[in-house]
Every structure is written in C-alpha cells, then in structure tokens.
Amino acid sequence: MTRGPHFSDSQAALFDLDEAPVQPVPDTKVLPSYIKDHRARLRERFMIGGADALPDYELLELVLFRAIPRRDVKPLARQLLSLFGDFNGVLSAPVSRLAEIKGVGDAVVTELKIVEAAAHRLAQSKVLKKPVVSSWDALLSYCQTAMAHGDVEQFRVLYLDRKNVLIADEAQGKGTVDHVPVYPREVVKRALELNATALILVHNHPSGDPTPSGADIEMTEQIREAGEVLGITLHDHLVIGKSRELSFRAEGLL
C-alpha cells in the first residue's frame, strides 16, 4: 500500500537549512554582501563570546535572521525593542500586538514564540524535581521569565513533596489585566492527586507593581486554611512584577 503524505515528512525539511526558506522579495533576489557579511560576523561574535557579547538589538537580529532571510533586520529589531522595552519584553509580547507592526509576519512571530518557549523550558528545568530551598534563586528567575511580561494575570501553583522537592508546576488559569479566578478547593484537590504536602502560589501583576490586593490576600488565606485541614502547607505566595517580586512570607502576610 502506498503511504500518503504524513505530517512528519515535512518536519525534517525545517532543519535542513541554516535559515528559513527563502521567500521571493522584489528587487532583492540576491542577499547584498554587506548584509551577508554582517550576519556572518554577528554569528561568529555570538559563538565566541556568547549572549553577553551582544546588546539586545543584535541578539534579536540573530533571532530574526531565520524569519527574514533577505533583508536588513536591524531597523526592525530596534523598533521592537523600542516598543516592548527589552529582549524579554519582545519575546513575551502578545501575538496580537506583534502582528500590528509593519514587517512582522507569521514567520517572525513564530520565531519569537519558539525562543520564548525554549527560555521557559530551560528555566523550568533548573527548578523542577529539585529542592526549592537550594534552588530558590533559580525558582524566582523562572517565575520572572515565565510571568513578568504577561499582559493578563496568570496564576500558577508549585506543588512540593515531603522533602520540599518541586514535583509539579501547573497553571491554574488566566484572567484579565487585574484579576484571575482561583478556586481554593481545586488547588487543594490537585495537591492530593499529586500526593503533594506543600504549595507555593505564584501570580503576576501586568501593571508591574507586585503589591498584593485585598483579593490576593483573601484568596491566599482561603487556600492556606483549606490546605491546613488536609495537612498541606502553604509555604509562600509570590507576586511577580515587571522587575521584582513580592513574597507574602517575607512581608509577614503569611
């Protein structure tokens, strides 16, 4: 029997080229030598010195090279940084906002979101299955990477075992710019399913100010009380702002 086309057949081709498939561009069928040389030098500097050797706009250029193979991407890189603040802000920008920018098509959005997802996975790998006490700084870094630039509130629960090892990191839901619905019963129920004995709550404030609201404090107390009945300890609640985080435990709110 002859096998028809399969999804996997197209995947290997994605990695055959150093850059994204060339799309015809009027009057620019050949990549100008100055752009070609610039790209080669930039890649070389990155391979020798790593990310620290490049400012944000040049690191962003490297990401854009694959999506835009026939054009100078420096102006677009600078424009994106101007609009979204920094490299992390560009990667975390909502797809709807990115799509409004001239020169940003599906290929650019895809490349940015692939890098963002990879950054989240890498940061998460440094804390998952590890004791939170010994990886606290990495945990804070992960929370900042995953949530600091979100445009709506997101609520996550970190589930710990008896040795305070992080056994699960789960998003409970997304809300609006200043509210996300959280159900204490569901949080505690999931802890029982995972055989977790402790929790760390995490949510972001898109405004950038991590100061907890009255609703944040009330919800935290509800989860603490619900867990206490079943022997589940609430270690902390972290509120993630744009540039810093606030700990309920450190602030005496828990």
Image (spheres, rainbow, N blue to C red):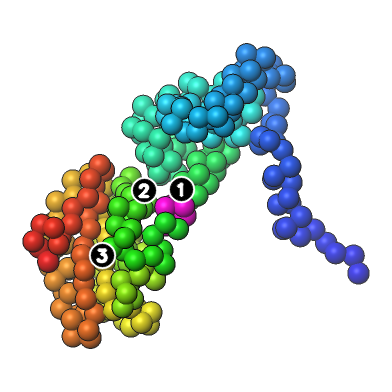
Find residue 160 and report its horizontal and vertical position in percent. 32, 72
Residue located beneath label 3 in the image: 201
Residue at 29% x, 57% y is: 136
| Location of the C terminus (image quadrant) | bottom left
Query: Is residue 123 part of the magenta span, yes or no?
Result: yes
Q: Nearer the viewer, residue 127 or 27?
A: 127
Q: Please give the name of the residue rendered at 37% of the width and 38% of the height, measured from the top-left corner.
A: 89
98 relative to 66 in the view: left or right: left
Q: In this view, does 99 lie above or below 173?
A: above
Q: What segment is highlighted magenta in the picture?
A: 120-124
Mark 1: amino acid: Ala
Mark 2 and mark 1 residues within 8 Å of each other at the beta carbon: yes
Label 1 sits on residue: 119
Residue type at mark 2 is: Thr
Vertical order, 24 against 96 (above or below)? above
Q: Is mark 2 on a helix, strand or loop?
A: helix
Residue 81 in percent (x, y) is at 39, 29
| Residue 200 percent location from the top left of the image | 26, 66
Alpha carbon of mark 3 to alpha carbon of mark 1: how far? 21 Å
The three-letter code of the residue at mark 3 reads Leu
- On the picture, is 97 further left or further right than 24? left
The main secondary structure of the magenta stretch is helix
Which element is circle 3 on? Answer: strand
Residue 237, quarter of the rendered image: bottom left
The structure residue drawn at horizontal position 28% and vertical position 63%, both measured from the top left corner, is: 133
**Mark linked to residue 130:** none
Instruction: Give the crowd class for mark 2: few <14, some 14-19, many >=20 residues within 10 Å.
Output: many
